Image (cartoon, helix red, strand yellow):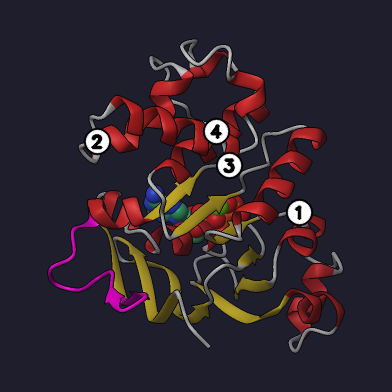
Amino acid sequence: MAKRIDVSGLNAYYGNFRAVEDISMTIEPRTVTAFIGPSGCGKSTFLRTLNRMHEVIPGARVEGKVMLDDENLYGANIDPVAVRRTVGMVFQRPNPFPTMSIKENVAAGLKLNGVRNKKVIDEAVERSLRGANLWNEVKDRLDKPGAGLSGGQQQRLCIARAIAVEPRVLLMDEPCSALDPISTLAIEDLIGQLKEQFTIVIVTHNMQQAARVSDRTAFFNLAGVGQPGRLIEIDSTEKIFSNPSVQATEDYISGRFG
Ligand SMILES: Nc1ncnc2c1ncn2[C@@H]1O[C@H](COP(=O)(O)OP(=O)(O)OP(=O)(O)O)[C@@H](O)[C@H]1O
Ligand SMILES: [Mg+2]
């Protein structure tokens, strides 16, 4: 099976503290993988190692290998800024650039990439906003501030901004946790559409959401406070939610801890 991401022997540290230990997993193209597990087990940390955002934190470092297609993201000649373009990220709280219009928000990445042609930019803005299911709501106010949209609209704007540069992978860290149920469903529908084109990894505390949107689910856990997070198992979402291989997974998804 073709792999988009192939992680092996990955450890992530904050200073001397090892936050995630010895993670290996593969992710296929055009799938949605959900990361679940109790608070502090390293889901966000691990997610950020997949686009080299972890090391932005002073004292933070990564050991191990993350292959994206045929390239090790931690290889010697890799530019972390280029990695972050190829592996886009959407955060828990929508974070549109506050001084920019809706259109400028979506176009920001393209401009950073050196795209200057107005027609090319306009087309990409429309395509991305349509892709994020936001076009109809904003097409008459593209020059208004992005920060003036509702929370759910802002999150879709951030998704439009992320997909405008056509990343190969889209990482989402609890993208719905600040949203109302209707906006949450809108984002979930959108994830279902986006996976036709992108490979998606989503962290969520919502078990129903993991079950609804993902093809595969990875359960992370930690042995105790101060212990590193580990990948306990990864399998088809159906298997994880009906008949997981590990008791701790069963306990977690059935709400017995966490
Ligand atoms: N910037 C940081 N500096 C030092 N330690 C950190 C930092 N960020 C996270 N950690 C620690 O790393 C461990 C993993 O944290 P992480 O945020 O990855 O967990 P998580 O699974 O995403 O939790 P949550 O579900 O609460 O978001 C925790 O012990 C946390 O305290
Ligand atoms: Mg987190």
Q: Is 27 inside the magenta-drawn segment?
A: no
Q: Looking at the image, is mark 3 or mark 1 earlier in the sequence?
A: 3
Residue at disc 2, secondary structure: loop
Q: Nearer the viewer, residue 162 or 131?
A: 131
How many angstroms separate mark 3 from mark 1 (CA)? 24 Å
* Residue under pointer 4: 129
Residue at disc 1, secondary structure: loop
Q: Looking at the image, is mark 4 or mark 2 earlier in the sequence?
A: 2
How many angstroms separate mark 4 from mark 3 (CA)? 5 Å
Q: Are marks 4 and 3 in contact (CB under 8 Å)?
A: yes
Name the residue rendered at 45%, 36% in the picture.
161
Which of discs 1 and 2 lies nearer the camera? The answer is 2
* Image coordinates for residue 178, horizontal then vertical, percent: 67, 34
* Residue under pointer 2: 115
Mark 3 closeness class: few <14, some 14–19, many ≥20 residues within 10 Å = some
Residue at disc 4, secondary structure: helix
Residue 63 placement, left or right of 35: left
Please give the range of residues in magenta. 64-80
* Residue under pointer 1: 206
* Image coordinates for residue 64, horizontal then vertical, percent: 31, 79
* Residue under pointer 3: 131
Q: Are marks 4 and 1 in contact (CB under 8 Å)?
A: no
Q: Nearer the viewer, residue 60 or 93?
A: 93
Residue 174: assigned label = none
Q: Is 76 inside the magenta-drawn segment?
A: yes
How many angstroms separate mark 4 from mark 1 (CA)? 26 Å
Residue at disc 3, secondary structure: helix
Q: Looking at the image, is mark 1 or mark 2 earlier in the sequence?
A: 2
Would residue 53 be seen by someone viewing this image from the given angle?
no
